[in-house]
Image: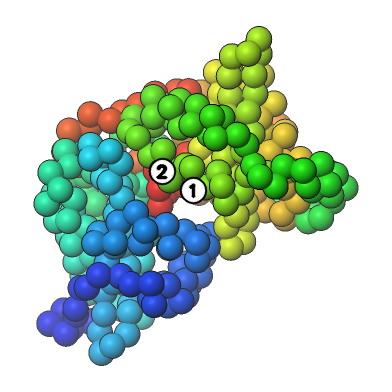
Amino acid sequence: MPDAATLHIRLLRPRDIAVAMRLKEGAGWNQAPEDWERFLAMSPTGCFAAERDGLVIGTATTISYGGILGWIGMVLVDPLNRGGGIGTALLRAAISHLDSLRIPTVKLDATPQGRPIYERLGFSEEYCVERWTLRRDAGGAAGKQAAAKDVDRAAGPAQGELEEICALDREIFGADRGGLLLSLGRAAPELVVTARSGGARRGYALGRRGSAADHLGPWAAEDPVAAVEVLDEFLRRTDRAQVIVDQVCPNTWIRAVLEARGFEHSGPLTRMYRGKNACAGQPARLCGILGPQFG
């Protein structure tokens, strides 16, 4: 068992990204180096590393959304060092940081293994999230057609379009994370998809290029028809062999949409909160979350 006395919790730094990626890969997660860069850019004093003998053996990240909601993610511990309270020490550092900012609500998405730890630290269940994965041949005809079509979209969606999506996301998610969404939209403009009817926006989605798969989310729609329209267009624009969606259970009809398109259930998560749940948002309008690391 690791010796807690030799453990040092410090700020995560840009030079730690390579080892953080190795920890992430050991856990089988899908984050890319750009995701770690976003954490550090958005919360330079709220991302932490657990270090022993000069080696980083664990991480945790935090983000503040509008000063009303704190998000904890990327709680990772090297497999050889698990069981000695390192994850708990990282979580306490993350919670302490968010408490110092007087943020009333803290949330995270827990794996089944992590949930008991979070419960001991005062987190309660909000609702379930289910991961769904589509596996297919990469570089198919549909993907090639999408790539050709989107050549003239290199500049991405108009600024006003992304800002409109950010405003809708603020209602549905429950807090302002517009800066993060703008960053994601600019990084993968071809994966910004909208559905409209009579000029009104009925659905939208952004996408993120992960290390092993494209991640669809946030994905919101007013009805199954709009959800299918957005999903089909997203799948047409990406030719990755894997596409991931983290579906929220309060949305009672999106599971059938995913099954109809060949997605397979690949694991549960639990959205949890600590403090007042003043940022509940409107999860019934949400099809897929941005991702466990971001909310």
Asked if 256 appears above or below 11 in the picture, the reply is: above
Tell me the residue at 57%/51% (across/down): 187
Q: Nearer the viewer, residue 196 or 138?
A: 196
Q: Given contact means CB atoms under 8 Å apart, are the residues at marks 1 and 2 in contact?
A: yes
Tell me the residue at 16%/85% (across/down): 6
The answer to which image quadrant residue 149 occupies is top right
Measure how far apart labels 1 and 2 are at the Cα level: 6 Å
Residue at the top extreme?
198
- Residue of label 1: 183
The answer to whether residue 187 is visible is yes
Asked if 19 appears above or below 193 in the picture, the reply is: below
Asked if 82 appears above or below 40 in the picture, the reply is: below
Q: Is residue 99 left or right of residue 22?
A: left
Instruction: State the colouring used for the structure image.
Output: rainbow
Q: What is the crowding at mark 2: few (fewer than 14 residues within 10 Å), some, or many (at least 20)? A: few
Q: Is residue 70 left or right of residue 205?
A: left
Q: SS class of the residue under badge 2?
A: helix
Q: Is residue 142 left or right of residue 83?
A: right
Callout 2, which amino acid?
Gly
Tell me the residue at 32%/33% (across/down): 175
Q: What is the crowding at mark 1: few (fewer than 14 residues within 10 Å), some, or many (at least 20)? A: few
Callout 1, which amino acid?
Ser
Per the rendering, the mark at residue 260 is none
The answer to which image quadrant residue 225 occupies is top right
Whole-percent x and y of residue 1? 23, 81
Whole-percent x and y of residue 143? 80, 47
- Residue of label 2: 179
Q: SS class of the residue under badge 1?
A: helix
Whole-percent x and y of residue 136? 76, 51
